[in-house]
Image (cartoon, grey):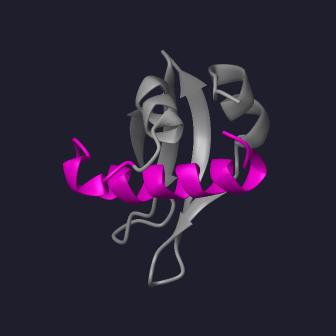
Amino acid sequence: MKLNQVKIYENLPIGKCIHKTRNENCFFITEYKNEKVFFSIPNNKDNLKPYTKSVSIQLIIEIFNSKNYDFKFFPYKDCRKSATRGIITILNFKLPCK
């Protein structure tokens, strides 16, 4: 089974926690726009104004469909790496037949 945009929308609804930090903070999916998954990350200075980051849906599909993706070569070195790993883990659990 190949992953596509519709399956991502179905298995990762808005509000879904995709990653939990060591401090027990969660990254939540906030929206889908311009073929990207947007997620919130905690703002330690102001809890009422979380930061928002995004990851390309195409990148998620490429990683999911590859056999053994090595995250050492992931194009970002920030929270997007953790969020993408969380997304892939959730999708692998929900869609185990690749």
Relative horizontal placement of residue 10, taking residue 25 as reference (left or right): right
Relative horizontal placement of residue 7, taking residue 4 as reference (left or right): right
Q: Where residue 2 sits in the image (x, y, percent)?
A: 64, 27
Decide which of 2, 15 is in the foreground and name it: 2
Q: Residue furthest top?
A: 34
Image quadrant assignment for residue 41: bottom left
Residue displayed at 41% across by 36% down: 55
Residue displayed at 49% across by 27% down: 57
Q: Is residue 72 magenta?
A: yes
**Residue 49 appears anywhere in the view:** no
Relative horizontal placement of residue 10, taking residue 74 as reference (left or right): right
Q: Where residue 9 sits in the image (x, y, percent)?
A: 71, 30
Residue displayed at 64% across by 29% down: 3
Image quarter of the N terminus: top right
Decide which of 48, 90 is in the foreground and name it: 90
Q: Where residue 44 sits in the image (x, y, percent)?
A: 37, 71
Q: Is residue 27 magenta?
A: no
Q: Main secondary structure of the magenta part?
A: helix
Count the marks: how many? Answer: 0
Establish if 68 lies above or below 8: below
Image quarter of the C terminus: top right
Q: Where residue 76 sits in the image (x, y, percent)?
A: 23, 46
Residue displayed at 51% across by 30% down: 61
Relative horizontal placement of residue 48, taking residue 81 as reference (left or right): right
**Residue 36 appears anywhere in the view:** yes
Q: Which residues are magenta?
A: 69-98
Decide which of 52, 58 is in the foreground and name it: 58
Q: Residue furthest bottom?
A: 23
